[in-house]
Amino acid sequence: MATSKVLAGAQVVLPTGTLTNGRVIVDGTRIAGSPAPDAETVDLTGHWVVPGFVDIHNHGGGGASFTSGTVEDVLKGVHTHRLHGTTTVVASTVTGEMDFLAQRAGVLSELAEQGDIAGIHFEGPFISPCRKGAHSEGLLRHPDPADVRKLLDAARGQAKMCTLATELPGGIDSVRLLAEHGVIAAIGHTDATYEQTVEAIDAGATVATHLFNAMPGLGHRAPGPIAALLEDERITVELINDGTHLHPAAFELAFHHAGAARVALITDAMDAAGFGDGTYMLGPLEVEVKDSVARLAEGGSIAGSTLTLDRAFKRSVTVDGLSVEDTVRAISANPARLLGLDDKVGSLEPGKDADLVVLDESFDLKGVMRKGEWVVAP
């Protein structure tokens, strides 16, 4: 059982700012306003304490796949990311046969109901063959609302997000269907024009799936989806900050234009995250991971990432020059809000789950707590 703890002496990042020589009080599974008489004091002088990371786009890790693995595999992948600070994770699928995806939704929904994952993200099959990335073209289909509804039903209320190429037949109606069911409609793997993207946003889309990747580039006469997604305050943009998916200038452009309130740092991780180089499967496609970069064995397209959010946090602060507070918003608070979980996670406030990460002065991970229990003891 979790015990009462006072984490003292650290720089503590709160929604209102950073406390120097601050403290976080943990009572059982939650953050408390005052310590119990028998509370254990943990001295974290010289460290940062930030909220646990929330990843809304993640396909696996630790050698295990959320798309095709057993329940034990999924739990292994979840644990791998917890070791790197991600205390809340949404399990993302990749394109497959509709019956297979419905079956996977059933498996994942049970884990969501148990609290092991925070829900399901369907990435494919409703995406553009022009921008398919690491998805099997032969399994792609138009976003027919009846097919989208089939996946939602299979997920038993645990679907959190669905990525669509909204310019395809049925796309706009599917966006409306998702919005009506409280599921995030995300624009991605799309060949949409600027005008088509605006139409999808007006219909209820609220997220840009890994902005810049798997969509037309920003043009000065045909600005395409990137401009529409960056300029609209209703859109939160996912960014993969691993140094491979985005040039630092593109990352800075997106963060500057969208602002800290509209960015969600994600991993888009596949099996190799936290595991190592080698040959893997992403859905039906073979992936070669070399020097921590995942690419399709055939064609060489980038195939997800091997990123973990502790690395994304450190890179954002030390390479890109973001403030710690803005990074916390993008890696914890914003994704928690998108998922409708900001009453439980995403910030260090009394009454919320005691999910937190301890970083040293170089922003290397030194401790992870989930619901009051150390996953990685500092």
Image (spheres, helix red, strand yellow):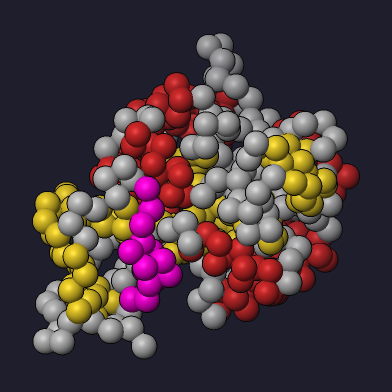
Above or below, comparing residue 12 to residue 188 in the picture: below
Image x and y of residue 8, in percent: 16, 65
Between 239 and 202, the residue placed more toward the observer is 239
Nearest the eye: 19 or 21: 21
Q: Is residue 345 left or right of residue 135?
A: left
Name which quarter of the figure residue 259 lies in: top left
Question: Above or below — where is 274 with respect to 113?
Answer: above
Q: Quadrant of residue 300?
A: top right
User: Magenta includes 24?
Assistant: no
Q: Residue at x 46, y 25 (%)?
A: 248
Q: Residue at x 67, y 74 (%)?
A: 72
Which SS does the magenta portion mostly show?
strand
Work out whether residue 232 can be spotted. Answer: yes
Q: From which residue to which does the magenta span run?
A: 364-378
Q: Position of residue 154 (x, y in %)?
A: 70, 72
Residue 60 visible in the snapshot: no
Residue lying at 69% horizontally and 74% vertically, measured from the top left: 71
Q: Is residue 366 magenta?
A: yes
Q: Position of residue 206 (x, y in %)?
A: 48, 47
* Observer-nearest of 25 and 16: 25
Instruction: Say which of 156 and 364 sits in front.
Output: 364
User: Can you give x and y, in whole percent of width and height, for residue 155 in the image?
Assistant: 65, 71
Q: Quadrant of the C terminus?
A: bottom left
Hey, which residue is sitting farthest right in the picture?
Answer: 138
Q: Quadrant of the N terminus?
A: bottom left
Residue 92 in the figure: left or right of residue 359: right
Q: Count the labels in the image.
A: 0
- Residue 200 image-quadrant placement: top right
